[in-house]
Amino acid sequence: MHLLSALLAAASLAGISTFALAGPSYTADGKLELPANYRDWTFLTAGIDMSYSAIAMSMGGSMFDNVFVDPAAYKHFQETGQWQDGTMLVIEMRDAQSKGSINKHGHFQSGPAMALEAHVKDSRFKTGWGFFEFSSNDPAPMVPEKEACYSCHQAHAAVDTTFVQFYPTLLPIAEKLDSLSPEFKRERAAE
């Protein structure tokens, strides 16, 4: 207990805040439990019909992506430009509607989440991060590390395998604190 107090005091003297990170919760067989309160977390961004492929998927409709992060991880990022171990980002996909009530133009989100995914920073994983796809509110197994999401995030993510380039409140912080990845800096310079 004294060691923890000393570490917290040292972090405070160094000007680094400490935050109570909820962190991931796993089942005995390693599946990630979906945080029940993720919608109360810090909202990072929403995208509509985003695709990382030149050949966009055709689903016959539009879809919103909403990204949430644990508030403690968000505060840590604001101060350091980095994600701490235990950071969880949850993305939910929702149907985009254009006809409803008094709406005459544009889109709004409707219905239950069509899909849920999580991106978890955990030093126990080989790559330091794991991806999880939920088919329901049941715990989700980790996406195998051979899948393309890992190499894509490594090659294109602005900060620590996360697409901070799409988070308007965090990109300026990463630029100011110079925590942008070399891969992203090269990609940006080539644009």
Image: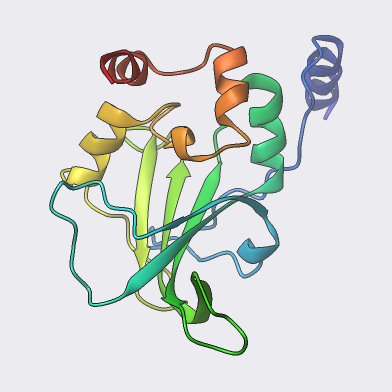
**Spot occupied by residue 56 in the image (x, y as percentages of width and height):** 19, 57
Vertical position of residue 62 compared to residue 84: above or below: below
Is residue 27 visible in the rendered structure shown here? no
Instruction: Please identify the residue farthest to the front as the structure is shown.
Output: 104
Please give the count of numbered marks on the rendered protein: 0
Q: Quadrant of residue 15?
A: top right
Looking at the image, residue 53 sits to the left or right of residue 108; the answer is: left
**Spot occupied by residue 34 in the image (x, y as percentages of width and height):** 51, 66
Is residue 163 visible in the rendered structure shown here? yes
Q: Quadrant of residue 175?
A: top right
Viewer-nearest residue: 114 or 109: 109
Query: Which quarter of the rendered picture does the N terminus lie within?
Result: top right
Query: Which quarter of the rendered picture does the C terminus lie within?
Result: top left
Viewer-nearest residue: 136 or 100: 100
Q: Residue at x 53, y 73 (%)?
A: 108
Viewer-nearest residue: 116 or 106: 106
Looking at the image, residue 157 sits to the left or right of residue 15; the answer is: left
- Give the colour scheme of this rendering: rainbow
Instruction: Please identify the residue farthest to the bottom as the structure is shown.
Output: 101
Q: Residue at x 62, y 23 (%)?
A: 173
Q: Residue at x 36, y 45 (%)?
A: 130
Vertical position of residue 9 compared to residue 138: above or below: above
Vertical position of residue 120 compared to residue 116: above or below: above
Vertical position of residue 139 compared to residue 112: above or below: above
**Spot occupied by residue 129 in the image (x, y as percentages of width and height):** 39, 39
Q: Residue at x 40, y 18 (%)?
A: 181
